[in-house]
Image: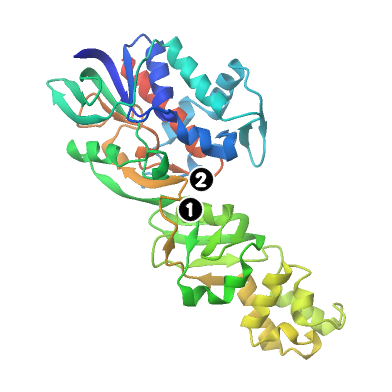
């Protein structure tokens, strides 16, 4: 039996950050993980270069049933603070797109940095160590493990993440512990994930696999209305690309997506004006539309509208051009699902924020029990926001542990 001030379960981004900070504040910390390989989600993120934060991070970049919950932690440990830590460890990085920061070299540098920070805090590691049970022993927590005996801690931090990417070890452990101690869970589901469509619905779009274009995309769901302007990618099963990954956090079954395939173009008005003035020449409708949209997409959309692809623009009825323009700027499609946790980058839902303090991440009705990172019902947009939530919630928790 070993005794510690703090036990952190989960050696991912949030867990390592919290353990390191708590250790450096003078607490005796043990970091436990069922895997022998730590930080796997960090390792595979950003194409192996880890999109470790976003300079534009704010509470508005997260979905949660309490949209204000993340505000306190993000304000107290910002993207600039984490960048300062990265600079301290002499890790070269670059901004790729809209505030997204990536390592120049390898995501392994972020893992090594966190390991070094844990070392500076004297953190005890117990990897390859499954926790069979968690019990409350008076005012303390007892972890019954398979390979490290019983670990006793005054405080317990759950940083075990969500259900996304099970092949790297994702489990429902954090949700089980929350339920064991009576905390409510917002039903977890895949997020930042491609969307799929029923075969019949998708048949007209199947030949578009590989086509990409910038779109406006919107949907209403459990987390309210979402709208993004990003690239969309057609696949054999449905839709992917940044626009779709973003909207997937908002979408819920039964809700359609509304897609503007040409956000900078009032398609109907443009086509009717070109017909009236003859400014587009004598080309057919699909050829003229290909000036604004990818060629395959232009032809497919025309074929869906009274076979307009082969019609000369001058001969195409106005009603057909109006219908075609409406399809381009207000395409409504109904997904039948997602590609699941296997392809999801994160999990939306988790421990209900109404059960936690936004200042400390501590369970409001159970002293000494904390939940941080992805296991909580706070999910960032695509682009480094989820890592920033891991860092910020971890630091808020560590500061509270010291009090």
Image location (x, y in percent) of residue 56: 59, 37
Residue 343 visible = yes
Q: Describe the element under mark 2 as helix, strand or loop.
A: loop
Image location (x, y in percent) of residue 317: 71, 90
Residue at 47%, 74% in the rendered image: 199
- Front one among 242 and 359: 242
Image location (x, y in percent) of residue 197: 47, 68
Residue 63 visible = no
Quadrant in the picture for residue 33: top left
- Front one among 15 and 49: 49
**Colour convention of the picture:** rainbow
Residue at 23%, 36% in the rendered image: 177
Give the left or right position of residue 279, taking residue 270 as reference.
right
Q: Describe the element under mark 1 as helix, strand or loop.
A: loop
Residue at 18%, 14% in the rendered image: 1
Quadrant in the picture for residue 4: top left
Give the residue at mark 2: 381
Give the left or right position of residue 259, taking residue 104 as reference.
left
Give the residue at mark 1: 193
- Label 2 crowd (10 A; few <14 / some 14-19 / many >=20): many
- Front one among 190 and 363: 190
Image location (x, y in percent) of residue 220: 44, 61
Give the left or right position of residue 358, taking residue 194 as reference.
left
| Image quadrant in which the C terminus is located | top left
Looking at this rendering, what residue extends furthest in the left direction?
138
Instruction: Calculate the distance from the C-alpha at mark 2 to the C-alpha at mark 1.
Output: 11 Å
Residue at 23%, 40% in the rendered image: 176
| Disc 2 and disc 1 in contact, CB within 8 angstroms | no
Relative vertical location of residue 57 with respect to residue 93 in this rendering, above or below: below
Q: Earlier in the sequence, mark 2 or mark 1?
A: 1
Indicate which disc residue 363 carries: none
């Amino acid at each position: 039996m070993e005794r510690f001030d703090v036990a952190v379960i989960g050696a991912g981004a949030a867990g390592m950050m919290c353990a390191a900070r708590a250790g450096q504040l003078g607490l005796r910390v043990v970091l436990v993980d069922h895997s022998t390989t730590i930080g796997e989600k960090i390792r595979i993120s950003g194409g192996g270069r880890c999109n470790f934060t976003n300079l534009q991070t704010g509470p508005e970049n997260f979905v949660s049933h309490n949209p204000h919950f993340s505000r306190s932690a993000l304000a107290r440990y910002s993207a600039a603070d984490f960048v300062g830590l990265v600079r301290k460890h002499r890790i070269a990085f670059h901004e790729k797109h809209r505030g997204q920061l990536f390592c120049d070299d390898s995501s392994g540098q972020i893992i090594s940095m966190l390991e070094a920070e844990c070392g500076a805090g004297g953190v005890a590691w117990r990897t390859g160590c499954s926790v069979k049970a968690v019990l409350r022993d008076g005012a303390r927590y007892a972890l019954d493990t398979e390979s490290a005996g019983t670990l006793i801690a005054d405080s317990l931090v759950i940083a075990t993440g969500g259900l996304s990417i099970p092949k790297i070890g994702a489990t429902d452990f954090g949700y089980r512990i929350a339920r064991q101690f009576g905390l409510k869970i917002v039903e977890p589901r895949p997020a930042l994930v491609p969307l799929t469509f029923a075969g019949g619905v998708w048949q007209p779009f199947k030949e578009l696999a590989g086509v990409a274009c910038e779109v406006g995309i919107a949907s209403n769901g459990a987390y309210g209305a979402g709208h993004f302007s990003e690239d969309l990618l057609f696949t054999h099963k449905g839709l992917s690309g940044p626009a779709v990954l973003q909207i997937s956090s908002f979408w819920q079954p039964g809700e359609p997506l509304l897609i503007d395939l040409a956000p900078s173009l009032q398609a109907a008005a443009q086509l009717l004006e070109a017909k009236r003035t003859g400014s587009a020449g004598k080309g057919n409708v699909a050829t003229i539309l290909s000036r604004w949209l990818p060629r395959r997409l232009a032809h497919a959309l025309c074929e869906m509208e009274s076979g307009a692809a082969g019609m000369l623009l001058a001969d195409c009825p106005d009603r057909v051009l109006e219908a075609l323009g409406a399809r381009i700027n207000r395409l409504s499609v109904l997904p039948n699902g997602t590609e699941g946790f296997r392809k999801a980058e994160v999990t939306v839902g988790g421990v209900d924020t109404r059960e936690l303090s936004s200042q400390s991440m501590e369970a409001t009705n159970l002293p000494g029990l904390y939940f941080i990172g992805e296991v909580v019902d706070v999910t960032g947009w695509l682009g480094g926001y989820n890592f920033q939530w891991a860092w910020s919630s971890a630091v808020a928790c560590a500061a509270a542990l010291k009090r």
